[in-house]
Image: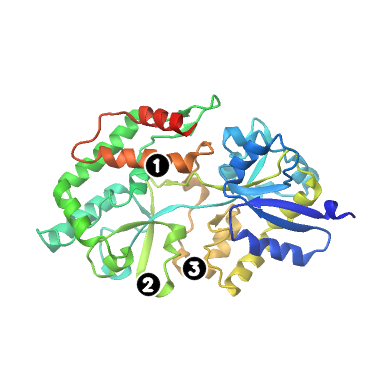
Amino acid sequence: MSNSDSTIILWTDKPEMAAYVEEFNSVQDKYRIEIVYKKDPGNTLVKTNNQSNENVDLIISEFLNSPETLALFTPLEDVYKDDTMDMSIFYSGLLDLGYKEDELFLLPVSFNLPSIMFRKSMGNEDIPSFYMNSEDMENASKNFNEKSTTNFEVMGFSQRWETEVLFINAILMETNFKMLNTGVLSWDNQKLLNSLEYIKKWTNETNGGLEQEEEFTTKFLYDPSYKLIEESRILFYYSDIVNFFGIAPEKRKNLDFRWFAAANKIPVFGNILFSGIPEKAKNRKGAIQFIHWFFDPETQKNLLKSTQIKRMDTFGFANGFSSLPEINKNELPIIYPNLVGNIPQESSLIFPAPLPLYWNELKTKVIKPWMYEQTEASPVDKPLHTVIEEWLKQRS
C-alpha cells in the first residue's frame, strides 16, 4: 500500500482530537491519520472546494450541517451498509441533523447543554430536582433578595449577567432561529420580543430596577462566579456543562447544577461537533475505517479512560456529551459524580435547526449585543433583522 493510500488527512479545530488520533494510529497499522489544524474547517472547505491542491479526507468541526457546507460532503451510505455500523447507537434527533433529503452526510460527535449552578448546601426549597426554568429562578431569587437585604448587597440572579442567558431564554420561548433552504436566517420575531419583555419585567420586579441591578453588577461581579455563590453573594449563575466541569474540582466541590430548561425541555447548543467525508476525499476507505473505530462504544469507553489517565483538560467525550447515549448514561457518571442521576433522556432535548456557517460570529457580535441593548434603559430603535443585514453587508 502506498503512503497516499495509507494516510488520512483530517482537518479539525479541536485540540482534543490529537489524543484520539494518536490512539487510532497506535492500535492499527493499516492507516495513519495526519491532523491539519484549520481555524475554521467548514469555511475553509467552502473556499477551497474547487482547488485540487487542498487534500482532505475527513473533517471534524462545528456547523458542518449548515446549508452551504453540507453539499460539499459525500453521502455515508457505505459507512453503515450491510449492517457494518449500528445507527441506532446514536441519538436519533442528532443523527437527523446530518441528513439532506434522504441521505446521511454527517455523523454527530458531541454536544453541549446549558445549566444553572448554585451552592449544594443552600437548603433551598425553591430548587427543583432536575430542570431549572426561568420561573423557578425568578421565584427563588425573589425569596433570596427579600430574606437578605433591601440594599441589594446580594442578588439572587439576573439574566443580564451573561448575554448567553438572554439568548437561551429566547430559544426556550420558541424564537426558533434557523437557516432556510433559501439561505435566509429566520426566527419568530414576536417570541423574541416577548422574551426581552420578560427580562425587563424580571429586572424591575425582582431586582429593584435597572439601576439597582447594574449597580450590583458593577460592585460585585468582578469575582469568579463560584466564589460569589460560595459567599452567598448571589444564588445562581449560568454555566454550560462543559464550563461547569472546567471549574477546578476543589472550587467546584460545593457546587451543584440543574439543567436550564422550559417545560422539561433542554436546548442543545447549535455548535454541535460533526464528522464528515468531503466529496473530493482521496482516502475514503481510510476515513470510513476511522469512523467505524471512532464511533464504536468500546472505543469511546477506552478513549474516556485514556483522557482521564492523561489528565486532559476536556469534559466528557470530545469536550461534550457523546452522540452515543450509552456513553453518557453508563460512563460519564463514573468520571463525574455530579452527573449521577443527571443525564437527560433524548426526549427532553431540543435539537437545533441547521444554522449558518458564520453562526457563532453572528450570535456573538450581533444577536447577543442587540438583545442586551434592548434590555437597557434607552435601547436603539432598530429591529434585529436590520442590524443583521447591515452586519452581513459589512462582512461581505
Nearer the observer: mark 1 or 2; the answer is 1
Circles 3, 2 touching at the beta carbon (< 8 Å): no
Give the x, y percent position of residue 111: 53, 51
Is there CB contact under 8 Å for labels 1 and 2? no
**Quadrant of the image for the N terminus?**
bottom right
Task: Please tell me which residue is depicted at 51% across the width and 37% down the height of the picture.
Answer: 355
Looking at the rendered structure, the secondary structure element under dot 1 is: helix
Taking the image as shown, residue 196 lies to the left or right of residue 313, namely left
| Badge 3: residue crowd in 10 Å (few <14, some 14–19, many ≥20) | few
Q: Residue furthest right?
A: 1
The image shows residue 393 at horizontal and vertical percentages of 45, 29
Count the marks: 3
Depth check, mark 1 against mark 3: the one in front is: 1
Amino acid under disc 2: Lys
**Which residue lies under the disc numbered 1?**
365
Calculate the distance from the C-alpha at mark 1 to the C-alpha at mark 2. Answer: 31 Å
Q: Residue furthest top?
A: 182
